[in-house]
Structure formats: C-alpha cells, structure tokens
C-alpha cells in the first residue's frame, strides 16, 4: 500500500501547495518562525536531507508543523500580492517551492505516528487535524490565488510551457476547482466546516482502531489451546503476554484484516473461533474504541460534501481524477469479476466441506475454519506445507538477495547498508541506493516487525520527496507487520510475507525512480487506481526462476529444491476465489458506502454492511470481506475512500504488463529499463491510460487477471498443467 500524509493533507500542501492566502486568513508575520534549537528549523544536513531522528523529540513536531503553516501563509501572501501579471514562475512554480518547513516536519511526523506512535504523538495528531484541514482549504478556496491560476490556465496554449509544466498547471487548476474554488463564499464556509469535521473524524477513527486492535488481542491461558502453532510462535505469544503484564499467559495479537495468520495452524476449533471473533468484533464492543458511530458520520458527511461540490455521491467526486474516471466504470470492472470469482468461491467451499466430512466431522464450514482446512487441502493436493517453506525465507536474505537482487537485474541499481544514519526505532534498517554507474539515487528505510504502537498492514511513503526544482532526492520507507522472532531465533517469514516485501518495494521503486522537476507530479503522486500498479507488478519477481533460488536458501545453505518450487507454482492459484474474493468484497463494500447520496442520511452500520455484501454476488458468508466496515482503515483513515477497487484494477494492469514481459523475454535488463522509462519514472507527468497503452501496446483487459487467478471468464477453472 502506498500510504502517507499526502493522502490526507500533503496532497494539497505539497502537490498543489495548499497554503492560505491573505484573503482567507490574517497575514502572519514572517517572524513566526521556529527557534534554531528545533531540529526542523533548518533543512537536515544529513545525507539526502534524511530526518535527524536522533535529535527529534516528540514535543518538537507540533511547533514545527504550526510554524510551517505560518511560513507558508507568508509565502503565499507574497504570491497573491504580486502586482505584475501572473506567470508560471511567479504563481505555479512559487506554489511548488513553498512550504519546505511544513513538508519536512509533516513527512517525518506522519511516518513516525503511523509506525511508532505514542500518547504524545496521537494527541498532536488530534490537535493538528482540523488545523491542517483549514490550512488546505485556505489555499484551495482562495479567490485571489484561483484568479491567478485561472488566468494562466485559460492562456495555457500560448505560454510555451514544457509538457511537465503544462501538466502541473492543469492539475493545479483542476484540483482547485475540484476542492471548491468556484463555490460561493457561503458554500466555501460550509465546505471548510465539513472538511474540519471530516479530518477530526478520520483521525478519531485511526486512533480508536489502533486501540481496539490492541485491546482485542486474544488472551489464551492454556498452552494446549495453541496446538498447531510453531514453538517460535508460541514463544512470541508468551512474550507478547509478558509485555502486557500477563506472565504465564499467551497473547495472539490482531492483524488488521479479517482472517488472522494463526487461523491456518490452530488445531483447536474453539480457539480458532475465538480468534476470528476477536478480530471480527474488535471495533464493535460498545466501548470507547467502537468505531461504528464514527464511520456512519463519516459516510454521511462525505456524501454532503460531494453534493455541495456538485457530485451525486462521494464516489463520483473521488473518481473524477482517477484512471477509471467514474463509479460506473469501476463497478462495471468489478462486476465482470464477480460471477467467475463467486463461482470459484463456491467450488472451494464445497471442497473444504468435503475435507471436513472426510475427516469424520459433521460441522458446517465457518470462516474461522477456512484457512485451517484450506491449508490441509493445499498439503493434500500439492503436498505443500507452509512450515516446510518457512526455513527458506529468512527475512534479511529475502531483502538483500531477493528484493534487491531482482531490482538489480531489472534496473541495474545497487544497495549499501548505512548504519551511520539515525532511525526512529532500533529495528529500522537504512540502505543507500545507487545507479549502475554509482550515482546516488536516494535512501531506503525498512521497518518490518510488528509492534503494538504500529498501525496494521504494510505501506510505503517518503521522508523526502524527489524534485529537481527543490534539488531533493527521494528518501523512502517500507513498513511491515511481520511477527518478530524470539531473541536468538532466525527471522523466518511466510511466502505471503515475501510477496508483501516485493509489493512494498515496488512502490519504493516508483518513488526512487521519480525524475520530475515539480513535486506535485513526482514519483507516487498518482491516482489510487494507478499507484498500486508498480507494486503489484513487482510481486511477480518473487517467484521468478532467476530470483527465487537466489534468496530462498535455508540456514544450512541449501537452495530451495526444484520440487518445492514446482509445488509453489502449482499451488499459485489455489484458493484464489477466497483470497481475491475477500479483497473484491471489501472493494464493493467500500463503493457501496461511498455511493450513498446525501439524502440517504446516517446509516445503521450492521444493516448497511449486510445489505451491501449480499448485493455483491460473492460467497461472503463463507468468505467474509478482507476488511469489515468497522476496521476498514484504508477507506476511513488512509485516503482510499471509494478507491479500494484500485487494488483489483491495478492487478489487471499488472497482469497485462507482466504478460507483456513474458512475451518479450521476461526478466531482462532491457525490459526493466523500458518499464522504468515508460512507467516508473513518469510520475503523473502524463495521463494514465495513454501512458499504459504506450507501454503495453493496447488497453488493459480482464482476461490476463482472471488467467492469473486460474479462472476462465465463464467461471470454470483453467485446467492445471
């Protein structure tokens, strides 16, 4: 997942330079600056301007962020007070240059608050949320600034701009219109109030969910109830309990998804059910961490905002600048998948029910049984045991000899560990990335281990954005939530974790190869239904015959045997109806929430969710959505509202692109360079559909995606080879 503060605020602050002007807020004296002792007061002197985490204290963020907003107000006041006619440089480029203090503080703050938060940081986030919303509105809704931008936009064909400059001007104008710049003064006031409410609610949702996930962890008293887990996993559960002041007990922490990893191994059905229900109800306990009222209000207010801006629904508003362009296209795409995927789910459920019966049991398959019996069936059909695979996937080797190696073979880049740069948590690793000729590209931070004070899931973002205008190179981080081994034990991970590492590094490559002048169109500043394309495409190299044997080596130095590789590949489409269907159901649930008109009013969360899932045509009783409404962090707190379909949409793009690679020689340096030149280095300097068509030779089709899932368009299975 591509995640950052940009999804909430920096989209405006750094990509359209959303800075209040004098017409909206009182002028702020230029003396409103930070004391020199604040580590954000001046640009970092570390390599690549990396954040000086060794100097940053929790109390430094709020004054830096507030001073950053004040500094931008002064900068933008200067822009709107210019007496000469607007030019690209004195208006658009000036906006792109503004807000340096705010950006360096915000990127560091939101990186840490997502991965290593605490009470002080959460309180800072809560206090600043409405201030950031007001800050964004002040620039986007400023009539003087909009007048200057519109003058340039109307004259754009006569300005002799470069293609990138024209794109930046066009997007700045369109973003301001989209944000409400053409509303009446009264409606702008209403919009600002709505934005403040939404920002506050989104922050509240994130904080409630983090607390709910921690409090909802399953506590087990009897070690026997954990039968099926490995010794290392049991030791880790005991350690988690000890950390929480419960020595002698065991704690299974919750992953931010419906299905939990331990469900595939736990032999005690009652424990499986308890763990599933702990996750399923984590944020629906009627306590202070219950998110239902928050999300019901969020959905209602988003619909009201869309109406105010002239859109029928929030989904119409969000998709206007996406690759799909409108909800009808996105829904049509998902509906093409619903019938064949639903048919596959029902086949899989029947197989699992037969497996249960064959073992002499007569209970009805439930969601907490699915992964357990699916793993048994996987072993029976493919003789593939995940525990047999784990010894070949040691996390450091996966990173250096797998993820890095594939990138080197495709793009020629190299990696050097940096232990001299400060980090925000001791487990974080830093690498310098260089071109084939040794020219530095940027820095990469990796933070992989699960912590109670870390948001769930995995993501990528920037500490420093690339821009030729600003003279900055990318500083990027990948965050995961893998289970940390007990001291002295190897960091063994599942193949799903391996895939996650390749996925997030695909985002990183998109950021590292950014080659833009203007920060607003740099790197991963792209549409939701395009930004996941490079990451999902990068997953393919995890199983590439040139890459897999290079990193899949156990502690004795034995390379993963060919017969085991063959089993992995034969099983690649196993359970695809379940795994893909979970995400597809979540995407349709998201679209249902955000297709509500303003007249619909506030919804009962449970009733609405039940109705929405029933309408998908998927087997959501046996295969519940990957995220339930009450813990759907992507859409209520991380900027993916009406956009979760992007994961499936970009799987279509990735399947088509990978098919192109397969038809042109696979993993080669030449193919990698072509992909870098035509996709990864483009940012948002071009429109997405023509960009993809230029690389692929044609528009994307659903067929390659279904083929990757092992399903034909009519719902039948593709015969195994």
Image (cartoon, helix red, strand yellow):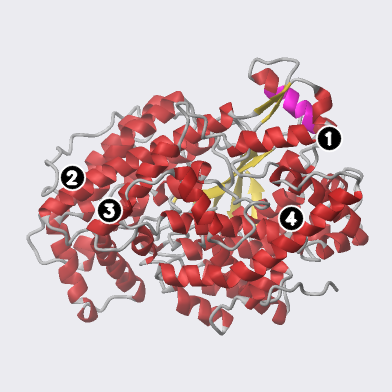
Q: In front: mark 1 or mark 3?
A: 3
**Spatial distance from mark 1 to mark 3, Cα to Cα?**
50 Å
Q: Earlier in the sequence, mark 4 or mark 2?
A: 2
Which of these two is toward me, 428 or 621? 621
Q: In front: mark 2 or mark 3?
A: 3
Is 696 positioned to the left or the right of 683 in the image?
right
Q: Earlier in the sequence, mark 1 or mark 4?
A: 1
Q: How many marks?
A: 4
Q: Quadrant of the C terminus?
A: bottom right
Q: Check contact, mark 4 vs mark 3: CB within 8 A.
A: no
Identify the mark at residue 305; answer none if there is no mark.
Answer: 3
- For disc 4, the marked residue is 402
Kindly state the secondary structure of the residue where label 2 is placed.
helix
**Mark 3 Cα-neighbour bin, 10 Å: few <14, some 14–19, many ≥20:** many
Q: Check contact, mark 4 vs mark 2: CB within 8 A.
A: no
Assess whether residue 99 is covered by the magenta stretch.
Answer: no
- For disc 2, the marked residue is 74
The range drawn in magenta is 233-240
Can residue 555 be seen in the rendering of this structure? yes
Which of these two is toward me, 523 or 42? 523
Q: Residue at x 43, y 29 (%)?
A: 121
Q: Earlier in the sequence, mark 2 or mark 3?
A: 2
């Amino acid at each position: 997942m591509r995640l950052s503060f940009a999804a909430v605020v920096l989209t405006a602050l750094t990509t359209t330079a959303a800075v209040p002007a004098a017409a909206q807020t009182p002028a702020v004296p230029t003396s409103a600056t930070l004391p020199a002792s604040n580590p954000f007061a001046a640009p970092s002197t570390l390599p690549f301007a990396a954040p000086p985490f060794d100097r940053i204290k929790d109390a430094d963020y709020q004054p830096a962020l507030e001073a950053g907003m004040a500094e931008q107000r002064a900068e933008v006041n200067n822009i709107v007070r210019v007496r000469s006619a607007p030019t690209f440089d004195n208006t658009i480029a000036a906006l792109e240059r503004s807000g340096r203090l705010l950006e360096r503080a915000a990127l560091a703050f939101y990186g840490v608050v997502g991965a290593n938060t605490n009470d002080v940081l959460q309180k800072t986030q809560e206090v600043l949320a409405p201030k950031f919303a007001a800050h964004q509105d002040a620039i986007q809704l400023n009539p003087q600034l909009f007048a200057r931008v519109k003058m340039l936009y109307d004259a754009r064909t006569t300005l002799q701009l470069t293609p990138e400059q024209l794109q930046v001007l066009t997007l700045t104008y369109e973003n301001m219109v989209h944000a409400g710049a053409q509303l009446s003064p009264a409606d702008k006031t209403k919009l600002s109030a709505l934005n403040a409410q939404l920002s506050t609610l989104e922050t509240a949702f994130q904080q409630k969910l983090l607390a709910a996930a921690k409090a909802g962890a399953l506590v087990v008293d009897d070690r026997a109830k954990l039968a099926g887990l490995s010794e290392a996993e049991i030791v880790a559960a005991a350690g988690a309990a000890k950390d929480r002041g419960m020595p002698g007990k065991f704690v299974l922490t919750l992953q931010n998804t419906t299905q939990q990893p331990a469900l595939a191994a736990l032999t005690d059905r009652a424990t499986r059910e308890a763990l599933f229900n702990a996750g399923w109800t984590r944020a629906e306990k009627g306590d202070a961490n219950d998110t239902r009222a928050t999300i019901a209000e969020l959905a209602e207010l988003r619909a009201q905002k869309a109406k105010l801006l002239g859109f029928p629904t929030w989904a119409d508003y969000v998709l206007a600048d996406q690759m799909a362009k409108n909800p009808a296209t996105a829904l049509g795409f998902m509906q093409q998948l619903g019938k064949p995927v639903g048919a596959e789910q029902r086949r899989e459920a029947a197989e699992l029910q037969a497996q249960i019966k064959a073992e002499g049991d007569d209970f009805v398959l439930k969601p907490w049984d699915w992964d357990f019996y699916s793993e048994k069936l996987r072993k029976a059909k493919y003789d593939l045991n995940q525990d047999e695979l784990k010894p070949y996937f040691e996390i450091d080797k996966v990173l250096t000899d797998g993820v890095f190696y594939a990138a080197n073979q495709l793009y020629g880049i190299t990696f050097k560990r940096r232990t001299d740069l400060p980090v925000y948590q001791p487990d974080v690793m830093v690498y310098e990335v260089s071109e084939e000729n040794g020219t530095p590209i940027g820095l990469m931070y990796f933070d992989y281990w699960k912590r109670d004070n870390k948001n769930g899931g995995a993501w990528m973002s920037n500490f420093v954005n690339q821009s030729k205008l600003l003279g900055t190179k990318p500083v990027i981080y990948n965050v995961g939530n893998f289970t940390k081994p007990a001291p002295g034990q190897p960091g063994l991970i599942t193949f799903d974790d391996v895939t996650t590492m390749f996925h997030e590094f695909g985002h990183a490559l998109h950021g590292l190869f950014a080659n833009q002048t203007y920060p607003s169109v740099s790197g991963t500043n792209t549409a939701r239904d395009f930004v996941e394309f490079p990451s999902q495409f990068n997953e393919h190299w995890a199983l590439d015959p040139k890459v897999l044997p290079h990193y899949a080596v156990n502690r004795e130095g034995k390379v993963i045997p060919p017969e085991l590789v063959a089993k992995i590949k034969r099983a690649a489409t196993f359970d695809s109806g379940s795994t893909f269907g979970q995400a597809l159901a979540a995407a349709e649930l998201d679209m249902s929430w955000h297709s509500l008109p303003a007249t619909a009013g506030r919804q009962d969360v449970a009733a609405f969710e039940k109705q929405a899932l029933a309408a998908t045509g998927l087997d959501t009783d046996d295969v519940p959505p990957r995220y339930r409404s009450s813990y759907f962090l992507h859409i209520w707190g991380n900027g993916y509202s009406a956009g979760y379909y992007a994961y499936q949409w970009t799987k279509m793009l990735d399947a088509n692109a990978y098919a192109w690679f397969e038809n042109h020689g696979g993993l080669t340096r030449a193919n990698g360079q072509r992909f870098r030149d035509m996709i990864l280095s483009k940012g948002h300097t071009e429109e997405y559909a023509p960009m993809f068509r230029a690389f692929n030779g044609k528009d994307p089709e659903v067929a390659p995606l279904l083929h990757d899932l092992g399903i034909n368009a009519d719902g039948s299975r593709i015969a195994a080879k």
